[in-house]
Image (tube, coloured by chain):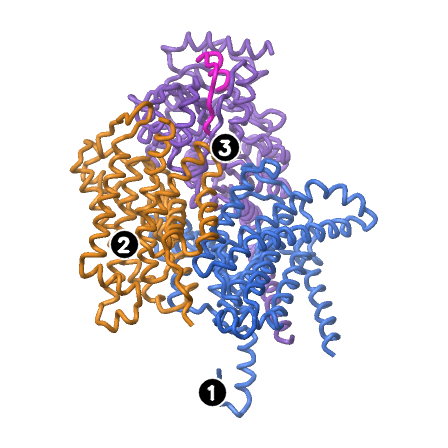
Amino acid sequence: MNWVKAIITGIIFIAILYVMNAMLSKSGFFGMGVDDYNGRLLVFICINIILATSLNLINGFTGQFSIGHAGFMAVGAYASAYFSNNYGVSLLQSFGFLGETGATSVVLLIAIVIGALVAALMGLIVGIPSLRLKGDYLAIVTLGFAEIIRIVILNIDAVGGATGYPVPGYANFFWIGIFTIITVVVIHNIIKSNTGRALVSIREDELAAEAMGVNVTRYKVTAFVIGSAFAGIAGVLFAHNNKFLHTNDFQFIRSFEIIIMIVIGGMGSMTGAILGAIIVTLLPELLRYLQQIQDSTLEPMIGIDLPFNIGELRLVIFALILILTMILRPQGILGTREAGDFFKRFRRADKPTGGVIE
Amino acid sequence: MDTFVQQLVNGLTIGSIYALIALGYTMVYGILRLINFAHGDIYMVGAYAGFILANALGFAASPSIFGFAITLLGSMAIAAALGMAIERFAYRPVRKFSKMTTLITAIGMSLFIEYLFVFIFSGTPKAFPQLLPNEGYTLFGNAKISTSQISIFVISILLMIALQYIIFYTKVGKAMRAVSYNLTSAKLMGINTDFVISFTFALGSALAAAGGVLTAQYNPKIDPLMGIMYGLKAFVAAVLGGIGNIPGAVLGGLLIGAAETLVVGYGGYIGIPSTYRDAVAFAILILVLLIRPAGLLGSNVQEKV
Amino acid sequence: MKRIFLTIGLIVSMLSSFACVQKGGTGTTTSTGDTIKVGVYGDTTGATSSFGQSTKNGIQLAFDEINAAGGVDGKKLEMLFEDDQGTPEKAKTVISKLINQDKVIAVLGEVASSNSLAAAPVAQEAKVPMISPSSTNPKVTEVGDYISRVCFIDPFQGSVMAKFAANTLKAKTAAILGDNSSDYSKGLTQFFEQEFTKLGGKIITKQTYAQKDQDFKAQLTQMRDQKPDVIYVPGYYGEVGIIAKQARELGMNQPLLGGDGWDSPELWKLGGVSLKPAYISNHYSADNPAPEIQNFVKAYQAKFNVAPDSLAALAYDSAKVLADAIKRAGGTDSAKLKDAINATKEFPGVTGKITLDGSRNAVKPAVVLELNPEASKFDFKETIYPEGMTPPTTTTAATNGNTTTNTVSNTNTNSTANTNSTK
């Protein structure tokens, strides 16, 4: 009865997303609402989950070393934004019979398909050199590609160049949530499939995998292309929610952020990547409140006017937390385990059999 | 012809700086297999150390070779100490863990240094004082070279010779080479690997700091984020030459410097506008790696079974 | 299968609990009676952090002065600053934090037009007035009636320098070296080129660089062969100082022309004597003896230990314009405040008399300054008025205080104004 359960779960998720989407809107959901700022953070958490899980497929499960994920995101974002800006309005009219919500959804879905395809194509192009290159060489090539993509986009005036590119806001939280769940489910299923086992075997030992008859080249490129396609989707959602694109948002520090997410959460763990995405999105924003704490609590409490503003140290503290996490918990918060494993462990511990766990 | 020579001189000037920074990348990589992303920031710290030294010791007021030499050596020493400290407190604890962990630590270190310097000195660019009497010389025709450019060439060559001497003719150099072949065996042979690694960081950081002071002398603008692009391009140079290979880093640096300048100079004729300058280094790298996957001078090591 | 649902369930519950917790927290931050909260956002940690720092300082100085004089209608102005790291995405995030969480009554910022363009729709939607001190792209205020600015727009400033080059310097050919990653630089390039070509000049070569570049000799060498009469460098002082130095090292002695981005005390240290001959268009001259300008320069120098650049002066003016509008609106009601800001007329700012036109852009004359690196100051050359604005008949004491060049400036002013009106 697996499918019944799946359908029920699906309905529950859609209902939750619908409610949350309503909470993010102006009118709110029966008076309950999330303000614009928190709504934005929720959206970024979702987009970062898509980015982190898709990069995790490449880096965490296949064991390749890609540090240019922002490039694929940029390609998806700009390609779909170009589409929406040039054909969006006329398509909205032709799909007008679906009502406004229906029409924007259709246009958004087309944009997502375009963004994913273009990013996948780009992934294929970058994936070819990954046939020959290993480790750090692959890393620098992906980084280089991402930078080249950014510089090329910066020089195309048709997509705004240095001014930036306004995009129609078709993507609401509902769609972003749906695609986050789709991404997580699809990548989870890939990992649990034959393909996934082949990918993990490549990560563990490439030569042995090849000897066992795994077509290493094909699987590597497959992983790369799928990962890029999802990065492209994240880009499309970002573009159509942020309503503005600029190449400054796709600098290599963005790629680093995505790697930080998967490493902090635990490489090769789905839930780890998700946890990492949440932490890396929220932490710098939460640190913004340090200044308020200093002004309203700390200084009156100790009675001294500190000679510096702690708010200005926000990113220094962020970097320190990052370094300390790596030193104290080098395998990431979850390591290669899933959050579900911990529940399992508790359940097993309940049983009287006990014994050595792990 | 003058224009071409002028562009070549311009390019090799930048290339020498890339080479100095790339040497640090390549040495650390050769020994630890670690991409030290904070290396570009050490270059920046070197420039700031020079700035503070020159102002504190009063060399900024009157240009002299003596003042320049003291500033250069002082900032190299400061950067060397910083490099050793970073290695000791950030990289050593995570050395035995996966490559990703060390990479994130390095990225974290890079962000830490950048933001700390933004906090201390603010992002406003500072003017680096003129330490050498600046004069222009005409090579021939219209091609010109300035004192600061000459100093970049001369000092980088001297430093590279010194490095070559340390690595091939001293005991610690021998130990460095041994560690780069195999860290565990070197340890078993009684080499104090921790010391050797520390020494490598010190050496690489000192070279980066020299690069920082020399660049600041040539382009007198320093800011806390100046190391990002230079660091990245030097890293590209190191990979281009074959990472872990010292002559390769020098070759890569000079090649990228020259190629960039020539693309800006002549790219217009073949339809590449000068804005693509930053993309050039990466494009060359990708092309070269497609033909020679281990870089220009790197040897293609067969994977161990 | 079970586990995956479990994990997704976990995430969703985490997200929703986060959302609810945050919602509960927002109520506590609403402003109290005796202070007026004003949001300021800018880049203090990213690639353009020097701009954000100047802007923040300028506004801080203005607020301190206003508060020392008793505040606005007895209420103190409080600045809430958020750093956007120089990226449009973060700019949008922080403006929405300022508006939704901190409940500010107005927002001041950003410098870079791209960041302002990303953030402005949030302010417009929330109906919170936003004054940009220094975003020069015309599109910024087109976002809506809650968005205004106190600086020039690119078309005006670009053509000012083109007119000066063609009419005063009698240049026939020009080369442009612009920052391709900066919207400001691209805007000035475009309008300089348009106007200069219209006046019969020729742009013989256009070269570009990217922010944070340190070496410009390749571009300059290329320019040297083409022998332009003038070189237009619409960038910021950090790059410009080095460009000037490297151009002179290559034996190029053409006049360098620039915009208000050059105006910073650090420029003299970076460029030194190579900044001659050079001319810039600016809002004001820091050496102008007019009291409001001198008091500002002195107070800023005393408070922050550096001389102000043009971004600080514009930020200072934007804060003063806002305070003036709050006073005129008789409170902080957003619609009234917006109307008061948009009705700003002849406001005596440091950067000239500010009048907002129908599209909420500041209309004010520009001054052309000649750089004098030996004395580390800008010498006044002439005033150029925007089309449709008649120059005052009396001596323009507010914008031009240099008495020795007064007569020259007046004839120049009139002749330029005439060319304007004949078109």
| Label 2 chain ID | B
Q: Residue furthest left?
A: B66
* Residue C177 relative to residue A351: left or right: left
- Is residue C24 shown to the viewer in this render? no
User: Which of A122 and A247 lies nearest the eye of the viewer?
Assistant: A122
Q: Give the quadrant of the N terminus of chain B.
A: top left
Task: Report the residue marked by disc 2.
Answer: B82
For residue A210, the mark is none
Q: Residue at x 41, y 39 (%)?
A: B259
How many C-alpha atoms fall within 10 Å of the one at disc 1: few (<14), some, or many (≥20)?
few
Chain B color in figure: orange
Q: Colour of chain C?
A: purple
x then y, percent, for residue B278: 45, 41
The stretch in magenta equals C160-179
Left or right relative to C40: residue C304 = left
Q: Kindly identify which residue carries mark 3.
A: C134
**Label 1 vs label 3, nearer the camera:** 1
Q: Was residue C73 drawn as part of the magenta stretch in this picture?
A: no
* Secondary structure category for the residue under label 3: loop
Relative image position of residue C317 (x, y in whole percent): 47, 30
- Tell which chain the image draws in blue: A
Q: Nearer the viewer, mark 2 or mark 3?
A: 2
Three-letter code for the amino acid on which mark 1 is drawn: Val
